[in-house]
Amino acid sequence: MMNMEKRAYDASFKRMAIDLSYARGSVKEVALELGIDPGRLSKWR
């Protein structure tokens, strides 16, 4: 069983990730670069 650490992201990190994903046009690329799950970034958008 994998030990998953729950992380909390502040509003400024979320805003930066969202803006970057729109600018680049790729949720997956940005999420992988930032080390977060692409599904999580999609929900933030």
Image: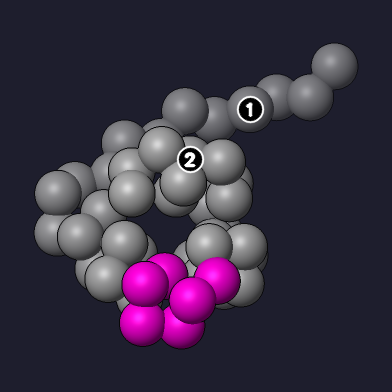
**Residue ID at (37%, 72%):** 22
Q: Quadrant of residue 7?
A: top left
Nearest the viewer among 25 and 35 is 25
- How far across and down, in percent of the image, does residue 21 sit? 41, 70
Residue placed farthest to the left in the image?
Answer: 12
Residue tagged by mark 1? 4
Where does residue 25 sit, x and y in percent of width and height? Answer: 49, 76
Q: How is the image coloured?
A: one colour
Q: Sort mark 1 into few (<14), some (14-19) or many (20+) by Cα contacts within 10 Å.
A: few
Give whichever of discs 2 and 1 has the lower sequence position. Answer: 1
What residue type is disc 2 on?
Arg
Residue 13 can be seen in this image: no
Which structural element holds mark 2?
helix
Q: Position of residue 36 (x, y in %)?
A: 53, 52
Q: Residue furthest bottom?
A: 24
Residue occupying image coordinates x 34% and y 64%: 17
